[in-house]
Image (cartoon, rainbow, N blue to C red):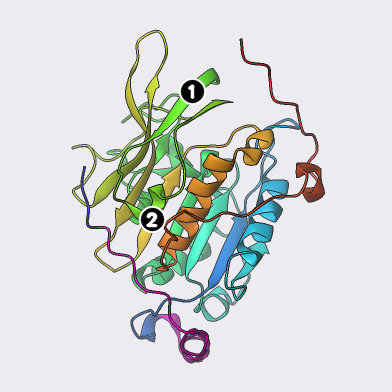
Amino acid sequence: MSSSHRSAPTRRDALATGTAAMLTSLPLSAAPRREPAQRVLIVVGPSNHPPGTHEVGAGGRLLQHCVAAFPPGTWKADLITQWPREARKEFASVATVVFIGDLFPPEVMPDRATIMADLTAMMKAGCGIVGLHYATGLEAKHVAADGDHPLLHWMGGYFATRCQHHKSIARVFPQATIEPAAKDHPVVRGWKAFTIHDEPYINNYFGPQGPAKNVTALATAMLPPEKPQRETVAWAVERSDGGRGVGIVMPHFYRNWANDDLRTLILNAIVWTAQHEVPRDGMKVRLPELTTFQPDSVEPQPRRK
């Protein structure tokens, strides 16, 4: 899997502000080609997982905190749990959308058709997209018989759960070592291999012929331990519309947001899909205690044997 990895330079604040104002004044379908902006939309979908797992609300608040802390301090993150009626006008200046929830949130939120139509327009305008853990997931009822779905093209792949065309695997591994897979890609900057107790999905779906030429593996793991093979657990796509997408199939346990390397991987993905330059050392944001973001539960890290 290969791709070009050009990162657009960060524009001056005035240019970004002017571009955002211009885009907001136009219908999204008529917007000029997107200039890098600094506005991130975090979409928190529903979840019925037990406390300590997924914690999508707390995870969304944590991401909002991190984006607000990005240098040079001019980034903005909007967090929503419901799709607004006037999304096309309201989201015209969004540089990238981050999804967190159980399954790809638009498929389980009210008014699916409207959300997908709005997202289609946003993606055509070059908006980025990031899916985290179960938010990368689609079921058979969401996809065509051959597995086709807009998310496959917007994000480059997805976690196929309860599907007939492909069967991805969800399993908690006591120790999964996540390794950078594309040393020259901006999203790989500033984080190193790490071992984590989590549920990184494996055998993810990248299309009937495997990953397209514009899809790049960002992180891999040798899983499952009893019959290991190199599995892609984070990937990136550079789309023909000029937009970018990243799928990262972690974290399952809320406590793993405290892992600096995993968090840097995720924050790099947000910056890169927003068409901004990822720093050489990656996006580093120090967190307060995870309880700050009001999860239902924070389980302690298990002791390693």
Q: Quadrant of the N terminus?
A: top left
Count of numbered labels shown in the rendering: 2
Mark 1 residue crowding within 10 angstroms, few (<14) / some (14–19) / many (20+): many
Residue 18 painted magenta: yes
Q: Vertical placement of 26 versus 52: above or below?
A: below
Give me the residue at 59% from left, 72% from top.
75
Is label 2 in a helix, a strand or a loop? Answer: strand
Q: Residues within 10 Å of mark 2 (few under 14, many from 20)?
A: many
Q: Find residue 128 and report its image quarter.
A: bottom left
193 or 146, nearer to the observer: 193
The residue drawn where x is 56% and y is 45% is 263
Q: Amino acid at mark 1?
A: Ala
Name the residue tied to disc 1.
Answer: 176
Q: Which residue is mark 2?
A: 245
Q: Are marks 2 and 1 in contact (CB under 8 Å)?
A: no
Q: Secondary structure at mark 1?
A: strand
- Structural distance between the alpha carbons of marks 2 and 1: 24 Å
User: In the visual, does 208 lie left or right of 267?
Assistant: left
Q: Residue at x 40, y 52 (%)?
A: 187
The magenta segment:
5-28
Q: In the rendering, which numbered label is found on residue 280?
A: none
Circle nearer the N terminus (2, 1): 1
Q: In which quadrant is the C terminus drawn?
A: top right
